[in-house]
Image (tube, rainbow, N blue to C red):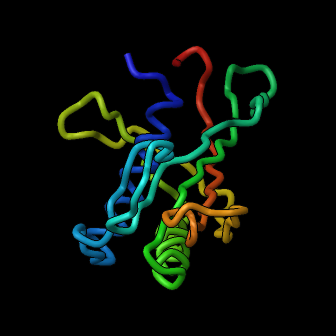
Amino acid sequence: MISREDLITQSVQSFARNQVFDVRGYPQDKVEFIESFPYDLTQLDRNLIAMGFNFDDDGEQAELGSDLKRRIYTIEFWVFGLTNTYARNLANVLKFALDVDGTIPLLDVAQTPPVEIDRLVLVGVTAHRQIFPNPAPWQQFVWTTQAKVEDTYHASAV
């Protein structure tokens, strides 16, 4: 069984990958998606988009008298660029790619191929430059794109 939180994270990452590579045509030899922050990175040989911190608010009851819940998830992508122009461009492309129609499909990734089971509402998405004191060479051009998505679900179903 895959938790709903993991379905959300994997769905947003899958949507971002599809938008960057398939819809917008960025070359995979220049850009790589990785599943987590690259703590052990020593050198950057192409631009990276890494999943960073993912967390949610504590949720709230969405409807009086039912088990309908609403939860906001914040999902960060860290963009490590070979140049500041490439990093800034990727962070902003990611920002607008995630906000292409205001929703992101929630996929059941346990099925092959994954099947859309719901939609996540995009609450907001931003991009920011990150500055590191005394950066390693791979930390010179770093941006983050942060997406907030809303999930409404029945608590008894998860």
Depth check: 33 or 1 in front?
33
- Give the tally of numbered discs: 0
Depth check: 141 or 65 in front?
141
Tell me the quarter of the picture where residue 30 sits.
bottom left
Tell me the quarter of the picture where residue 54 sits.
top right
* Rendered view: 85 above or below 18: below
Depth check: 22 or 91 in front?
91
Q: Does 32 sit left or right of 66 as displayed?
A: left
Q: Residue at 24% across / 67% down in the picture? A: 28
Residue at the outermost left position:
112
Q: Residue at 30% across / 76% down in the picture? A: 26
Quadrant in which the N terminus is drawn? top left
Q: Does 78 sit left or right of 14 as displayed?
A: right
Q: Position of residue 66 (x, y in %)?
A: 72, 21
Q: Position of residue 136 (x, y in %)?
A: 56, 61
* Rendered view: 74 above or below 5: below
* Rendered view: 27 above or below 98: below
Q: Position of residue 113 (x, y in %)?
A: 19, 40
Q: Residue at 37% across / 40% down in the picture? A: 107
Q: Does 120 sit left or right of 59 as displayed?
A: left
* Rendered view: 101 above or below 112: below
Q: Residue at 48% across / 80% down in the picture? A: 83
Q: Position of residue 77 (x, y in %)?
A: 54, 55
